[in-house]
Image: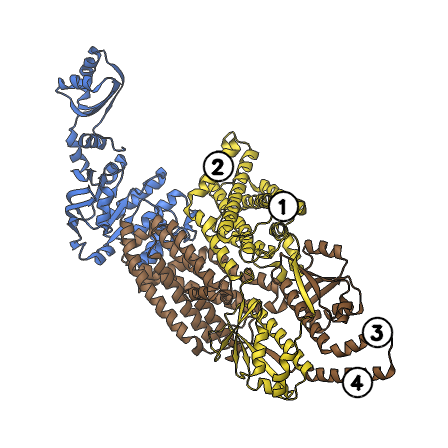
Chain colours: A yellow, B brown, C blue
Amino acid sequence: MILWIIALNDLKQTFKDRMFFFWFLVFPLLFAFIFGTTFSESEDQDRKVTLNVVDHDRSFLSNKFMSELKSEKYAVKMLDTETEESLRTLIIPQNFQKDIVSGTHVELVLEKAASSNMEAFQAAYSNTLKAIIKIISKIIIIAPKDENDLETLYDQKDLVRLISLRTEIAGSLKVIPAGFSHSVPAITIMFIIFNILMYGGILLLQERRHGQLERIFLSPATFGTILGGKWISRVILGMLQTILLLTVGKILFKIYLGPSLLSIFLVALFFCGTISGMSILFGSLIRKEEIIIILNILVANTMAALGGCWWPLELVPRGIRNLGFVFPTGWAMDALHKLIFFGQGFSSILPHIGMLLLFTLLFLILAIRFFKLRKY
Amino acid sequence: MKNLFHLVRKDFVRKWENPVVILGFLLIPFVFTLIFGFVFGAEGEDTLPRVKILTVDKDKSFISELVLRALTQGDLNELIEMEQVEEEEGYRLLDRGNASALLIVPKNFGQSVWDGEQTELLLVKNPSEQFLPQIAEEVLDTLTLILSSLRHIFTDELNTIREFDELDKFPDEAISTLSIKVKNRIEAVSKYVFPPIISLKQKTLSEEKGEGSDLSIYSYILPAIAMMFLLFICNTVFEDILREKETGTLTRIRISPASMTEYIWSKIVTSALIGIICTAALIILGNIFFSISWGNPGDVALLVLCLNILIAGFIAFLYAFIRTERQAGALLTTVILLMSMLGGSMIPVENFPPVIVNFSKLTLNYWGITAFKILMRGESLAAIFPILICMVLAGIVFSVIGSFFLNNNLKKGIAQ
Amino acid sequence: MRMLQIEHLTKSFEKTKAVDDISFEVKVGEILGFLGPNGAGKTTTISMIAGLLKPDSGKILIDSLDLDRDLRKVKRLMGVVPQDMAFYEELTAKENLLFWGKLQGVRKKDLDERVEYYLKKTGLLGRENEALKKYSGGMKRRINLIIGLIHQPKLLLLDEPTIGIDIQTKLNIYEIIKEASANGTTILYTTHNLQEAEELCDRIAIMDLGKILALGTFNELIQIVGEKDIVIITGKFSIDQARSIISGFEQAALLSLEEGKIVLSLEASKNISILLEEFFKKEITIDDVSIKQPNLESVFLKLTGKELRE
């Protein structure tokens, strides 16, 4: 019972700080919204990448070329001139048709505005390349002698796609989660670290300084009860964060959470256990609030970055990806990926739970070592 | 003026005696830049990891082997890491996230190509990856398009060979004719393909203005994150006002000959000076550890000065609305983090949809980062001069307004 | 010669009159003590004199300068020692003194001399380069005091400068205050400590509910209760019972009466036994009887009907 009294008291102290709700809910959601919106272009498969074209040639072949550019994924818009407002502009030079027919090299220029999304630009580049291949193939086959010949023969030959590429997604999903479905779980992990370390650590430090911890030690509560109560309060804090962010993410951003919600919460629970141990260690070791805040920023962000909360780990070298597993974030993120994106079950994350449990024990053992009554 | 000097000096000495917070805030951008550089390398986005594609060849024909070998040729080899596996193992490895995609060449693929019939390759993508499977898809889609085109180009020749194959007859004369045909065809192809008659050049619009070479990842990250923490550093100076209210030193100053206006301006000046010192430190450290070339030293110095005038003024302006430490924590932190998020300190502004970029331009971070980047690209002072003027003017306006309201608030607050 | 002149000073906060038409003067070099319970108006009065609060009406003249018109000039003449430790803990004692002295416009040469002098006076010479956060409470109080004195103000406002410190520090502080007074500094001193007020102050003002109830030297104030002894009787009696006994007892002057406790002024040696007999006749149980010489506490009690720490 005393354990729960201590735990609930710690939670009460935390909730009294109005700024807490900003860090607990408002800021993480804002973060998730901006990250999710920024990287969500691939989520909506019906949305087309727009490519603006400036055709200085306006010939039969340039029109055909533009037709090749248009497809399910790409929308093509004609512009009269190159304007700065265009994010991606393809420029077809004068004499495009004439030069190709005569066998003279033609250079198309694909311009990218500084504000263009990189992914969209690469998609536009790839699409343009494919259109070029189609045009060149047609030219080779019809081998026009002159421009009239080209216009006569072009439509006579229809090049059906003989070899195509069909894509599927591994696991039980039909759609690759992107945007918010990626960012919300990652941000949840990041803010669990941030909030538990900050509030958990600072509260303990203040209790030491103001003598409240001393008073608690003078009560009938045992050392284990006191430590346990403090640890559990921080775990509860983290779990509340998880439930809140995932629930709001589900309602507001319609994120996909995979088939096993219980497994997700289990991962979160063990992860919170680890971070709670860390927060008690910080609160026991450090004497100044400012240092806890600064250390929190450094530790939370380093673990988040290397663990895959900031950027998709696929973008980093394999060695760095493996480095992520030195941190509990790496294990937590990997477990979430398996559950959410592959739709796998609990058995697939057993090693992850095991590792998180080990981390928890490690930090708790260290916390016990330093969680002594020290006066400031 | 003398009092202003004494007050500034006093605050400097106090910060010097207890520099932990400022040093901490200085350290953070440094560490973050290190992390980014460590993870992505100094070249940044040019060094994406190779896309790991597992391949399953159910056909095991000459054509299927040719296709798979094509993935390991030339530039593709630098982009793709291929590994041949059995189907079951392939799915297992993919589920474990050990590859970005699994390519399955179906049975009779070669035969279908040979016969000119439609066929398809299957690409199974790793759902936990957003970018690399997409790259794999584009590369393979392009490859299959090329193959398809080649099939069309050599239709006649391949049909001729098929006929011979079916009849199991390879008359010498026919082969001779075929060879000439193939040679002519290859010559025709060569005319248009080697080199490609249509080439595609990428151009980022900033290059057109001759702004110099690309910046390293350190050059992107350090100024961006530093902007955010400069705001926090400046805030520590103004937070002092609230602390001095609590401890009673503000009352003492109020009773002394020093005016509240002098007191407030001492905070603005101290904050700007500390900001300048911290920015200078980050610039020097950035140069030493990350080889960041910031641009012409004189221009950079001017930018640092103007930027810190703006920051100090802005924070003073915000403090006009604050009465307690709690309010300071709430308002300042919210504003700084929001501005940093929108202004490019956390995510490069280039990644935002255009509608968000309009908001980005309202932030201090955006203009600070932009000005630094312009100088880093080797441009002259003239390119950022309008920005500098705006910074100074805005800083002065913010300072004046902030000072006025802060003065009134402090007078009321002390009396209460 | 008058250093401080207060004329019909009034200040209200919403419906409450914190200071209600007070007037008084303080001579050069005089130490005026302010006694009164919490909420009496002492801090409001001091704040107005310090220029922190604007009075609703009335005038404050400091060294013939109108505070309202000549605030800047007046600030140079004034020193403050607030109850809270108002200095910079991260700075050393010397750094604090130099800073505050410079802010008050003290010239460098004078400032260096004074810093050394006061540090020596407070026994802190040798520790001037330590940060104040490392000082004990008593040491901090001393520094707090000499910060207010470093510019040798003509008027010094002290707000309970000896709270929570040991006797040695207290005596040291008294010594410095007396020396300042002897050197011509006029001192306003608020305190709850009656003994301190008796010992230090030339005159004492007793304040309650925004008014100055009495102002004078210790002997003058004592006359309010007369030279009779102060007798405190505690026991098991009601207010009516006590009142009925006292009403017939002309030799005693009632100072305060509550259930079970009565405070009187009377010549104890002559009348105490007669009084007690009256109590016994009514079969009232007496727990305790104490007899004291007339002091400020009794004056305060008579004037306000309360004990000082309410």
Residue type indicated by callout 2:
Leu
Residue type indicated by callout 3:
Asp
Which of marks 1 and 2 precedes in the sequence?
2
Q: Which residue is mark 3?
A: B165
Q: Secondary structure at mark 1?
A: helix
* C165 in relation to B344, above or below: above
Q: Secondary structure at mark 3?
A: helix
Contact check, label 2 and label 1, Cβ < 8 Å: no
**Residue A20 screen position, x and y as percent:** 45, 47
Contact check, label 4 and label 2, Cβ < 8 Å: no
For this rendering, which residue is in front, A82 or C218?
A82
Q: Are marks 4 and 3 on the same chain?
A: yes
Q: Nearer the viewer, mark 4 or mark 3?
A: 3
Q: Which residue is mark 1?
A: A356
**To which quarter of the image does residue B356 belong?**
bottom left
Q: Residues within 10 Å of mark 4 (few under 14, many from 20)?
A: few
Real-space Cα separation, disc 2 to disc 1, in angstroms: 25 Å
**To which quarter of the image does residue B313 belong?**
bottom left
Q: Residues within 10 Å of mark 2 (few under 14, many from 20)?
A: some
Real-space Cα separation, disc 4 to disc 1, in angstroms: 69 Å
| Chain label for disc 2 | A
Q: Which residue is mark 2?
A: A8
Real-space Cα separation, disc 4 to disc 2, in angstroms: 89 Å
Which of marks 3 and 4 precedes in the sequence?
3
Horizontal side of C14 relative to B197 (left or right) equals left
Q: Secondary structure at mark 4?
A: helix
Residue type indicated by callout 4:
Ile
Check residue C148 in the rendering and tell me which mark sits there, or answer none.
none
Q: Which residue is mark 4?
A: B180
